[in-house]
Every structure is written in C-alpha cells, then in structure tokens.
Amino acid sequence: MSEDVRYGYALVIWQAFSFVEIQSTEPELLTELTKQVQEKLPKCHPERLLNVFGEDYVLNLKKLSNKDQEVGLWIIRELCHQGWEPFATEVAGQGAAPSHNTHFRKRLR
C-alpha cells in the first residue's frame, strides 16, 4: 500500500509601500499569521478572504506604516522556520514598486 502524501501551498506577495498578501491552502497558517501580525503591528487590520467552504485562503495586510518590505520578509522567515520550503520566486511588474512573489510548499504527511 502506498503512502498518502499531502502538501500544503503558500504564496507570499509583497509590494513596497503598498501591501503584503499571503495565500495558502492551509487555513490554520493564515489564522496563526493573523494573530502574530496583530500582536506586533496593532494598527494593522488584516483582511481575510474566505473560500466557498468558509475557510481562510487569503490574508491581506495593509496600513503597515511603510514597513511592507520588512513585514513581507518577516513572514517569509516565519514560514521557513515552520518548515515551509520556498521553491520559486519572481518579481512581477516594473518601475519603483514591483511585487515580490515567493512560493512555498510543505509536506504535511
């Protein structure tokens, strides 16, 4: 009998002076990141988007007092510390504020 392998996926997008967004197949990850961000940045009001099943799948962070890059990199570090593996990165757009996208995966079982 073969082992049932399952992976989680996450995407971190940040754009300097604008926003940080986290998308994930794992609602628990977004719930935990929301708590951590609110503790560290009480003025930030995260916006959570729900899928058709009522689960978190997107976390938008705005009003970060021009700390978007720092918050984006902090989230990337947190994911790496939790065992999420970055497997692709890209810079989208041109000009003074391109978005930085980092894709993660984690073997869950």
Image: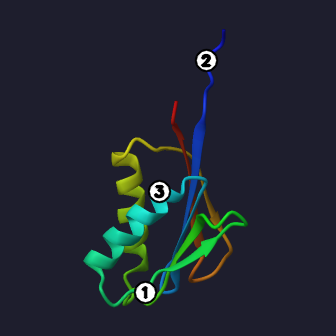
- Left or right: 49 in relation to 33: right
Q: Which residue was labeled with disc 1?
A: 45
Q: Residues within 10 Å of mark 1 (few under 14, many from 20)?
A: some
Residue 2, above or below 63:
above
- Left or right: 65 in relation to 13: left
Residue 71, above or below 108:
below
The type of residue carrying mark 3 is: Glu
User: Quarter of the image containing the N terminus?
Assistant: top right
Could you tell me which secondary element the residue under label 3 belongs to?
helix
Report the residue at 48% width, 63% height from top.
30
Q: Percent from the top left, x then y, of residue 74? A: 35, 64
Could you tell me which secondary element the residue under label 2 belongs to?
loop
The type of residue carrying mark 1 is: His
Badge 2 or badge 3: first in the primary sequence: 2
Report the residue at 68% width, 63% height from top.
53
Q: Percent from the top left, x then y, of residue 86? A: 51, 46
The answer to whether the residue labelled 1 contacts the one labelled 3, judged by CB atoms less than 8 Å apart, is no
The type of residue carrying mark 2 is: Glu
Q: Which residue was labeled with disc 3?
A: 28
Q: Nearer the viewer, mark 1 or mark 3?
A: 3
The CA distance from mark 2 to mark 3 is 24 Å
Q: Residues within 10 Å of mark 3 (few under 14, many from 20)?
A: few
Badge 1 or badge 3: first in the primary sequence: 3
Quarter where residue 44 is shown: bottom left
